[in-house]
Image: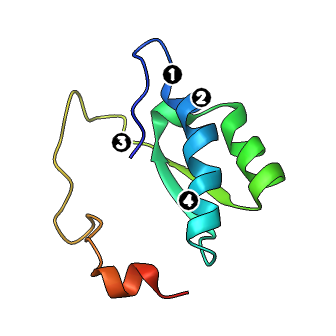
């Protein structure tokens, strides 16, 4: 978890959080993020961390918030799975 002032953008926070995650989860190779993370962060993540940052865009016809299909939602992993690596 990372707590920062509201004046810091999510993209700037990601430059702090992603290296920590990559160091902790050695097998981490791909990260999915919403459209708020578009821009140079994708290239930075690849060049500096060797990770693929995929931006997941919502469908053009969707307006506002729409819940994801439960089968597609990320499911939390047990701590034993997260610490293995």
Quadrant where the image shows the C terminus: bottom right
Q: Which numbered disc, 3 or 4, marks the residue closer to the eye?
A: 4
Q: Distance between the residues labelled 3 and 4?
A: 29 Å
Mark toward the start of the polypeptide (1 vs 4): 1
Q: Is mark 4 on a helix, strand or loop?
A: helix
Residue 79, compared with residue 44, is above or below; it is below
Q: What element does badge 1 sit on?
A: loop
Q: Residue 38, percent across and down?
A: 59, 34
- Return the residue at label 3: 59
Question: Is label 2 in a helix, a strand or a loop?
Answer: helix
Residue at image location 19% in from the left, 34% down from the top: 65
Label 3 crowding class (10 Å Cα cut-off): few <14, some 14-19, many 20+? few
Give left or right: position of 70 versus 14.
left
For disc 4, the neighbor class at 10 Å (few under 14, some 14 to 19, many from 20) is few
Q: Which secondary structure, mark 3?
A: loop
Instruction: Report, in whole angstroms, how far the alpha carbon at label 2 lies from the one at label 3.
Output: 26 Å
Q: Residue drawn at (41%, 78%), measured in percent from left and top?
A: 82
Q: Earlier in the sequence, mark 3 or mark 1?
A: 1
How much space separates mark 4 and mark 2, taking CA atoms?
A: 15 Å
- Relative to 72, 27 lies left or right: right
Quarter-wise, where is residue 50 in the image? bottom right
Residue mark closest to the camera, 3 vs 1:
1
Residue on which disc 2 sits: 12
First along the sequence among labels 4 and 2: 2
Q: Separation of disc 2 and disc 1 at Cα?
A: 5 Å
- Mark 2 or 3, nearer chain start: 2
Q: For the view shown, which residue lies furthest in the right direction? A: 47
């Amino acid at each position: 978890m990372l707590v920062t002032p509201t004046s810091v953008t999510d993209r700037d926070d990601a430059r702090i959080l992603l290296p920590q995650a990559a160091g902790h989860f050695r097998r981490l190779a791909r990260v999915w993020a919403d459209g708020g993370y578009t821009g140079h962060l994708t290239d930075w993540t690849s060049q500096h961390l060797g990770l693929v940052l995929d931006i997941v865009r919502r469908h053009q016809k969707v307006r506002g918030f729409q819940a994801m299909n439960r089968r597609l939602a990320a499911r939390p992993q047990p701590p034993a799975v997260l610490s293995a690596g």
